[in-house]
Amino acid sequence: MNRINKFNKSWTQQILDSSHIGVLVVDKFRNNLFVNSQLCKLFGYKESELLETTARVFHLSDDSFTKFGKEVFNYVLDGEPVEMDYRFRKKDGTVFWGHISGDFIKNNEEVLWIVIDIDQRKKLEFKNAQQAEILSQIHDGIVTTDLEAKITSFNHGAEIVTGYKAYEVIGKSIEMFYDVEDAKTRKQKREILFKEGSLHQELRFIKKDGTYIYTDLSASVLKDSEGKIIGVVSYVQDITQRRLAQEKMEYQSYHDALTGLPNRVLFKEGLVHAIKKAKHNKTILALLFIDLDHFKEINDSLGHQVGDKLLQETTKRLYTVLREQDVLSRLGGDEFGVIIEGLSKAQEASSFAKKILDTLAEPLEIDGNTLYVSSSIGISLYPEDGTTSENLLKFADSAMYKAKNEGRNTFQYYSAEMTEIALERVMMEVSLRRAIKKKEFVVYYQPQVNGRTDKLVGMEALVRWKHPDLGLIPPDKFIPLAESSGLIVELDRLVMREAMLQFKEWYKVGYNPGKLSMNLAVKQLLRGDFFSVLTSLIDEVGCKFINLELEVTETQIMSNPELAIEILKKVSALGIDLAIDDFGTGYSSLSYLKKLPINKLKIDQSFVKDLPNDEEDAGITRAVIALAKSLNLNIIAEGVETVEQKNFIVENGCDNIQGYYYSRPIPALEMEEYLNKANFRKDFLI
Ligand code: C2E
Ligand code: CA
């Protein structure tokens, strides 16, 4: 059949050929009868190729061909022209989307098809649909509003964030989510948004259940194709968890975890504020700096758990005596600060201080321990002492130290005189440093004697500062400073060296000075190099044969008992004796005492002072002697001045005596005279 005859290449065809739409005519067997050049181009065939075949070539498969035929048949039944988007195949096998519309011509004998390439449009549509799907699935909220702030779209994420379903909110004002408080700034924010084109803010949203969430909201204006603003799209992220974590962190950085009290940073802010108020109201403000007495010892000997509970209990007690408006803070360790505002007289602060002292001094039960903890309080005043928070804090702190020096369990005001003392301390430290360099120290020796036989058993080396202007300065005046400044390490090394050299000399010339007892600051002991320094000192002096003993105070050991035990064990292994100094004045625990490699306990002179008449002291002395015996330790009493004291102590089982009764600490030369006395001659000595 010559199909071409039916459609001559008339001017009609020429028009059709120049058209941008594909035209196809098929007969009822779907043989191609006519194709225009656009159709050939669309499918990639030559006209002649198409005219010799059927519409099957346009289909992806036989199935698709059949299906298409069936669909067209259905339309025919409905008497409707056919129109649909369909995926067709080109000659080269590639697939494209075409929009096809067709109708019967010539008494339903033939069908005229018009095919348009909609591949690009279709792909874009798919992409958009996909994006829309992604947007609807996204967990963050995306909300669009019109110019009247009415919600026009509300994705699935927005449903999750707010708890509302889209149908519940579409058409309503976005303001429904805003807090009344925030509403005040809304107008202003909208103006910025429309002016700048976008706005980023953190905003509280009210959820459907009435609770609040914090959101991070980025809004941008929506424009139509002509650039006219038609609404707003908002991207809403629920940042409640992040915000709460942030708030928690902020709280933690301003509060002490143990007591929940404001920390030093917050306290300082409060103080700055309180100063401003006092200035404005012309009232007096007092700053109380409270420090627990001997807290460290309790912490070290009874454990941190007890220490922690003590601090918590202290906080509770402080609250019982303070007014609601007084600001309480834990400034660190066992230090508390209180701001007392609105005073009319400086003296009024003392009644607060007194109340605090009294409440804190009450005995306390913690984990089966009864604790007696006193405190020391320093007070500084605005405007009398200082007008800045730094100064008030500094002055209250130094006043607190003054209270400690006054014997603790007391309070002190800061005063000008106080500053002088502080200054003196600085000067003193400078000259102490210089003195160490210049070796301005001399060692005195105090005999330790067997009270039963009156034989010399040893000597304690005690340092003195030979100040060029002030003369001989006793250790009590500079040892605490040497300890707090760290100078004690060098000082003790100087003393040990000189004393060892002296003992070596005495032994060499034929005296028997007995055991050399030296005081050892724990700062020295706990230094990493202590052990090697000690052994090389012994080597250098060459006094291996000398009987050495180191005295360490109970309180100092308890500052770091584990480490002290470790080092003392090594020292003890060298054959050096260890004595616990000032025994009975600290808080040492028996369990540590057993672990320590000690040889001797030294009964503190404070217990000896009122012997034998003071019953309590007599009891303690007897108890310490009994304890020493039960632990198989030697014992010595210090500060023995009278024969009565000596007799009491000896009768109670402590043979060794040190004190003015036998001799004051004396310089080496004098000691030689002492050693020269007949009954202390070598042959008479042990
Ligand atoms: P301490 O170790 O308790 O020394 C005993 C103190 O009691 C000495 O005071 C001594 O002179 C004094 N004393 C001895 N017998 C009597 C007495 O019968 N009655 C009275 N009232 N006092 C007596 P000193 O020499 O003033 O030393 C004071 C403290 O300084 C010593 O106390 C010791 O802790 C420390 N110290 C002295 N020399 C050194 C040293 O070289 N290094 C270190 N780290 N500390 C030292
Ligand atoms: Ca001592």
Image (cartoon, grey):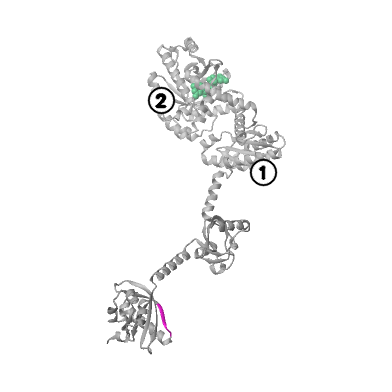
Of 662 and 200, nearer the camera is 200
Left or right: 337 in relation to 238? right
Please tell me whether mark 2 sits on a helix, a strand or a loop: helix
Of 391 and 42, nearer the camera is 42
Residue 671 placement (x, y as % from top left): 49, 13
Asked if the stretch drawn in magenta spans residue 81, the answer is yes
**Quadrant, the C terminus:** top left
Whether residue 652 is situated above or below residue 312 in the rendered picture: above
Q: Is residue 650 visible?
A: no
Asked if the stretch drawn in magenta spans residue 544, the answer is no
Few, some or many C-alpha atoms within 10 Å of disc 2 (few <14, some 14-19, many ≥20)? some
Residue 22's quadrant in the figure? bottom left
2 and 1 marks in contact (CB < 8 Å): no
Which label sits on residue 409? none
Q: Amino acid at mark 1?
A: Gln
- Image point 58% across, 19% down: which residue? 644
Whether residue 18 is situated above or below residue 641 in the rendered picture: below
Of 331 and 588, nearer the camera is 331
Residue 637 placement (x, y as % from top left): 53, 23
Residue receiving disc 1: 325
Q: Main secondary structure of the magenta part?
A: strand
Of 42 and 59, nearer the camera is 42
Ligand 1 closer than 8 Å to label 2 CB: no
Residue 95 placement (x, y as % from top left): 33, 72
**Quadrant, the N terminus:** bottom left
Whether residue 387 is situated above or below residue 93 in the rendered picture: above
For the record, the magenta segment spans 80-84
Residue receiving disc 2: 533
In space, the residues marked 2 and 1 are separated at their CA atoms by 56 Å
Q: Amino acid at mark 2?
A: Val
Please tell me whether mark 1 sits on a helix, a strand or a loop: loop
